[in-house]
Amino acid sequence: MWVKLCCLLLYFLALFVLARVFEAVAWYESGFLATQLVDPVALSFRKLRTILECRGLGHSGLPEKKDVRELVEKSGDLMEGELYSALKEEEASESVSSTNFSGEMHFYELVEDTKDGIWLVQVVANDRSPLVGKVHWEKMVKKVSRFGIRTGTFNCSSDPRYCRRRGWLKSTLIMSVPQTSTSKGKVMLKEYNGRKIEVEHIFKWITAHAASRIKTIYSSEHLKEEWNKSDQYRVKIYLFANLDQPPAFFSALSVKFTGRVEFIFVNVENWDNKSYMAEIGIYKTPSYILRTPEGIYRYGNNTGEFISLRAMDSFLRSLQPEVNDLFVLSLVLVNLMAWMDLFITQGATIKRFVVLISTLGTYNSLLIISWLPVLGFLQLPYLDSFYEYSLKLFRYSNTTTLASWVRADWMFYSSHPALFLSTYLGHGLLIDYFEKKRRRNNNTDEVNANNLEWLSSLWDWYTSYLFHPIASFQHFPFDSDWDEDPDLFLERLAFPDLWLHPLIPTDYIKNLPMWRFKCLGVHSDEETLETFQDSESDSDGENKEVFSSEKEASEDDELNAFHRRAEGEQRCRVETCSCASERCRREPYGRKARSYGSCSTAGDVEPDWSAWPSEMLHCTECVVCLENFASGCLLMGLPCGHVFHQNCIVMWLAGGRHCCPVCRWASYKKKQPYTHPQPLSDDSPS
């Protein structure tokens, strides 16, 4: 995960540097930067009209270029970046889709239940033609879509009862605007009653109703009162301009940020005394002033702060984000990071996509799960102060020059998605190249694996876990309520040669009990010098030696070992032990067992049974190598209670035979511990 995060941060850094390179190239070729101001006098009538349409100002009654230029100057300063974006948007001939409502519920869900947007709906009455023709309606849809206004058509033939209840007996235009200034407030529907069915007149009607929601100030006294007033809004944006009404993009943003930011229009057209404006730091008009508890910020002085809907929307979102904005941002970042796995993973192509799908599912699930408690905590009333401090941190950080560069780069790359995807693909291919080179230097075999080999290994893994019981990963010993494992019966009924070998981890071997074999009255030099820690290190070394020799064992050696063990079990009944005089006891399941170690009394020295674990069976011979236990040798016991040389049993288990050589009990499963019978006392009644 950290590798993918570092790769994603490196990609963002590359995008930032690439954007600066593009700016340098544009400056070298044209001689201007995106933040450089443009003189409207030098622009043509078509370009001036395009700027007015993007800002949402009507120009139908202004035939002269001078009047159009003055209107552009009154609405705000023009930058090279805004001019380039406006001309590109005009050249793009993309058709904007319009919604066709199927009935009352569809209309209510999209229009009346949407509290933070403006809708323009054309209602077509039964057996009537629409109020706006098809050609004019397409122009209308394209014009209002620039300002985030959604459009739709409701045909009364699909739901005539709803049209009669609403009073829509003739074709008309309906506009929905939030009625209150609070978030998620009521929505009011307004009907167009104009006589002229033209695009410009309808657009003026829309902008007039949208501007009526904005608080308008006409005098300096009113401005002084509003400026010093403290209310629920922590963030306010003022427009000081000599206009009849605010631009359409300003009105559309006031609807979009309802309940978060208050929009105020200060009309200074007929002001004689502007002294108070100088007192609060406003020296020129038009000006877009953002007022926060931290101070005053002049919008338009930094990179990418254009007088347009898209630029100001990204600016306000960074200052006063919603929880949904943060969730969408985290979702995009997490998925970009997850797609890095497609290039980091090496090997077969199918393997890459399987790992990618798994990573996407895991990351998105973790993201949603982690957001659930966050949403719950934000509902608590005690976290209001934490929420305010978080917004203050956002305002401090997003009013810096670096934040303006990031917003400008975001708008640039989002308007050029092909460039964004191509740079992401190129960055991923570079990661794939360096990762492949690194793994080849480390002699990793998975780099050269093809699709068939990987699918075959995946099928082997799947079938092995499908047809065989999975070994327990718990450390031995562990408590269990079952005296007998039901899987043992199924294993004995199965045909081992017809099944795949189970993939059982060998981690449990190091948790099996180990101790040294001692005889009473015999003390070797090795016992007096070695400590318990030395015995542990000795066992670890022997484990490593045995594990390294696992690959060298063959099937013939395995069969020979079985024959040797069978012959040894017959000879153990007659061979003598050098230090033991006690016979081995019962086998598991409570039956009388055959002895698998010699129990003759040829020697005078007896084993020290006190050093043995209580659940282990007493014996003096290893049935794997058919040799007696020597004093000081390292022993290892299995869960069934049988004891062997540590070296012998580890080699047996590491070879894939995860069962006891004597009773075939699984070496990784717990068994009811064996308890030695207590000898009868001499004074017991006969």
Image (cartoon, grey):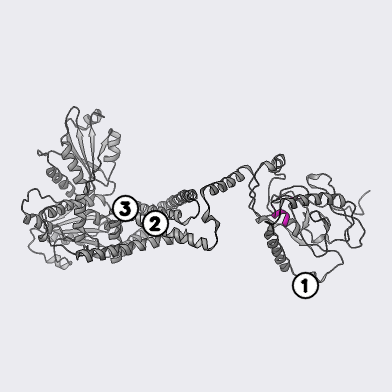
Which residue is label 2 attached to? 382
Q: Which sits earlier in the primary sequence, circle 3 or circle 2?
A: 2
Q: Nearer the viewer, residue 164 or 275?
A: 164
Question: Which amino acid, mark 2?
Answer: Tyr
Question: Which amino acid, mark 1?
Answer: Leu
Left or right for 683, reference 131: right
Residue 654 inside the magenta-drawn segment: yes
Which residue is label 1 attached to? 529
Which residue is label 3 attached to? 418
Could you tell me if the residues under marks 3 and 2 are in contact, i.e. CB atoms within 8 Å?
no
Residue that sits furthest to the right in the current view: 686
Measuring 25% from the left and 41% from the top, which residue is drawn there? 97
Q: Which sits earlier in the primary sequence, circle 2 or circle 1?
A: 2
Residue 453 inside the magenta-drawn segment: no
**Residue 68 position by quadrant:** bottom left
**Against 571, is 488 above or below?**
above
Magenta range: 650-661
Measuring 8% from the left and 64% from the top, which residue is drawn there? 273
